[in-house]
Amino acid sequence: MEIRVLGTLDVRVGGVSVVPSAPKPRQVLGLLALRADQVVPAEALADELWSGRPPRSARTTVQTYVLQLRELIDRALTAAGSAREASCAKDVLVTSSGGYLLDSGGGPTDLREFERLSGTGYRAMDGEDYPAAARLLGEALALWRGPAFADVPVGGQLTVEARRLEETRLCALDQRIEADLRLGRHRVLLAELTVLVDRYRTHESLHGQYMVALHRSGRRGEALEAFQCLRNTLVRELGMEPSAGLRRLQRSILLAGPEHVTERATERPVERVPAGAGAAAGSLGVARFSRVG
């Protein structure tokens, strides 16, 4: 089985899609795919489908959706032929302990691969192996094909999980950009960062990296202007000033000569991501901006 949730939902058995077109069964499959190889209680599925207000017929309706999914799995197994002839749909979508388990059969899932690659990338960053960190984190980010569960109706649980996953993506992106800055790739990063700071208009870490890339590219005035634009946005939309770390970075650029900044901004500013920007605020932790000059 192949499971992909980092974008549109894609679940395949023997290479054949088993994703239903109907919204509610797709929602059930989305939660099962997210928790592949774990039992998802029927109550959790009902809570997801009806936002904590399930009808009296909820359990029977969930069973109906599970049967519909098994019909799709049966067709996929039939199409797969003799290679999977020993399996049946109940071996793939298992009833267990008052709930249901989607058995991946050890097949690939994009979420597990993302977590493996990004975790290895973070360890490379900790070990100051920046080429490996940039490569591994880049491979992890390449697994994303859009927002998680992009085509799935989401209730309370999938909404929270989608936000959590987007936060993990932003963490990996932040560290991959940091690794690239450490490797002197500031000019290559400028186009990407220009798009990112426009999309995440109050995300201080990305703006700090953008300022560093601009300054290193000989665009000191634009780096200072980027700080002022961020400050105006923070004051207008959130009623707060930029963090101490970002203000130190701004002062470093302001006081430096046109070619050098020797001071480090050693504290990563707190990220503030507005509602609707696709990520939960904060929690990227403490790290260092790369040397600015």
Image (cartoon, grey):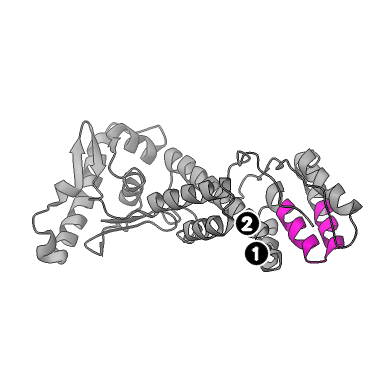
Q: Residues within 10 Å of mark 2 (few under 14, many from 20)?
A: many
- Residue 158 visible here: yes
For the magenta stretch, what is the residue range? 208-228
Q: Hey, which quadrant is residue 110 in on the image?
A: bottom left
Q: Residues within 10 Å of mark 1 (few under 14, many from 20)?
A: few
Foreground residue, 65 or 93? 93
How would you classify the magenta stretch by its main secondary structure? Answer: helix
* The N terminus sits in image quarter: bottom left
Residue 217 horizontal/vertical position (percent): 78, 66
Pointer 1 with pointer 2, Cβ within 8 A: yes
The residue that disc 1 covers is 192
Q: Inspect the image, locate mark 2, and give the three-letter code of the amino acid beneath it.
A: Ile
Q: Earlier in the sequence, mark 1 or mark 2?
A: 2
| Residue under the image location 71 percent in, 68 percent down | 187
* The C terminus sits in image quarter: bottom right
Q: Secondary structure at mark 2?
A: helix
- Residue 203 visible here: no
* C-alpha separation, residue under disc 1 versus residue under disc 2: 10 Å
| Residue under the image location 80 percent in, 56 percent down | 226
The residue that disc 2 covers is 177
| Residue under the image location 16 percent in, 51 percent down | 89
Residue 114 horizontal/vertical position (percent): 44, 52
Q: Would you say residue 35 sits in the magenta stretch?
A: no
Residue 44 horizontal/vertical position (percent): 34, 34
Q: Hey, which quadrant is residue 245 in on the image?
A: top right
Foreground residue, 23 or 8? 8
Q: Secondary structure at mark 1?
A: helix
Say above or below: 179 vs 274. Answer: below
Residue 53 horizontal/vertical position (percent): 39, 32
| Residue under the image location 38 percent in, 49 percent down | 112
